[in-house]
Image (cartoon, rainbow, N blue to C red):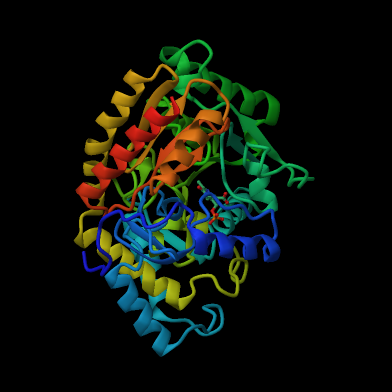
Amino acid sequence: MATGIPQRRVLRTDIPGPRSAELHARKIAAVASGVGTTLPAYVVRAGGGIVVDVDDNHLIDFGSGIAVTSVGNSAPRVVDAVRAQVEDFTHTCFMITPYESYVAVAERLNDLTPGDHEKRTALFISGAEAVENAVKIARHHTGRSAVVAFDHAYHGRTNLTMALTAKNMPYKHRFGPFAGEIHRVPMAYPYRWPSGSATCADQAFEAFTTAVRVQVGSDNVAAVIVEPIQGEGGFIVPAPGFLHRVAEWCRDEGILLIADEIQTGFCRTGDWFASTHERIVPDLITTAKGIAGGLPLAAVTGRAEIMDSVHTGGLGGTYGGNPIACAAALAAIDTMHAEDLCGKARRIEAIMRPRLDTLVERYDQLGEARGRGAMLAVEFAEPTPALAGAVSAACHRAGLITLTAGTFGNVLRFLPPLVIGEDLLTEGLDILDAAFQEVL
Ligand code: PLZ
């Protein structure tokens, strides 16, 4: 790894340290309080598995900025590509005078996403914007308006994507009224399925089809949108076979299946896309986050006949597929190939998963460990955020960046950069062990 940052944890002050505390006071005075901060250690540099703060603490990164820096922060190929692009031109607007890198990103996505049918791609800036556009395209193509989303879903913070998102606090509370024609159905969430995990897939599928047929009417439904592993909802891996059956049923009913792979995509789960594990070939796929090594880029990729049904000029945006973000994406995708980051994600799982299973065995308060590749989590049995928050805070104090998630805020989730060194990964897991000992 060419990052110049030594790949080891160094604690020089409390976390956060005094300089971070000063900056945080400025943040509180200047930044809208609605914009929260998980760990107020202010960053000056980052690379590989390390984040360096203003007090020169070197923190171990188990968050990747929420699954974004999968190739590592300032990954060498990304830095070179961005630098070269910034010197050539920074923006023309692809809708005005186009450039090759946008086309090349579309070609790569058409090639990498599941299914060997003909595809087209449109580029955007944020994940939420990609989801909005996938819904626009699905409605336009089908001439139907209803959209079905799942319990525990997260799809963004814009008006339509808030409506698609399940959880009230903090995402939706007092931000309504929300976009209409969104219908919610149960997710096959094995750990919390009332009659137990064995019956989960069958019963959830039955509940899904009944709700869509009886309450909405299949003919009215443009699309079903689903995260193949639910991210913010708590790294919920659907009961085996559930999504495959949903996909087949949708196809029979003429309903489009949108896979939101914004958090799961680009090697995170040990394959290019998590849909592959679920044996589904979505009609439309939304991507963002890991796509461009930290630059803002998002995409909708889908069947050519669906994507091309929209009239010219119907899709776009000033910055969508910005040339710097496209250069970064091409370099990030090259890095994923060259460094076999799908293999690295599986290796991370092989190291982390037994350690998480041991925690579950050791602590009654933990319900289960789950996830795939480098998208792993433990869920506390109690559906309240207290313990996950306390363990996460203990990790932060010890210099390990961890995140929580879950409808009940009771899930500790781990999203290390896929390039993280194994020593650092193990050290992070030791810190996690110690944090459990401290709190429980
Ligand atoms: N779809 C599956 O995970 C973003 C949200 C963080 P944007 N998840 C992180 C927060 O609290 O705002 C996400 C996602 C899935 C859509 C999105 C939205 O992507 O790039 O944040 O708009």
Residue 70: percent from left, percent from top: 34, 56
Which residue, as the protein is rendered here, is positioned at the far top?
Answer: 195
- Residue 390 left/right relative to 82: right
Q: Is residue 366 above or below residue 154?
A: above
Residue 313: percent from left, percent from top: 61, 71
The image quadrant of residue 430 is top left
In this view of the protein, can residue 373 be seen by the observer? no
Front residue of 352/77: it is 352
Instruction: Name the quadrant of the N terminus.
Output: bottom left
Front residue of 57/214: it is 57
- Residue 62 left/right relative to 124: left
Q: Is residue 43 above or below residue 116?
A: below
Q: Residue at x 46, y 18 (%)?
A: 200
Total marks in image: 0
Front residue of 6/170: it is 6
Instruction: Name the quadrant of the C terminus.
Output: top left
Which residue, as the protein is rendered here, is positioned at the far bottom?
Answer: 88
In this view of the protein, can residue 173 be seen by the observer? yes
Q: Residue at x 45, y 21 (%)?
A: 191
Q: Residue at x 41, y 30 (%)?
A: 438
- Residue 81 left/right relative to 296: left
Residue 145: percent from left, percent from top: 68, 45
Q: Is residue 164 above or below residue 358?
A: below
Residue 250: percent from left, percent from top: 51, 35
Q: Residue at x 33, y 33 (%)?
A: 433
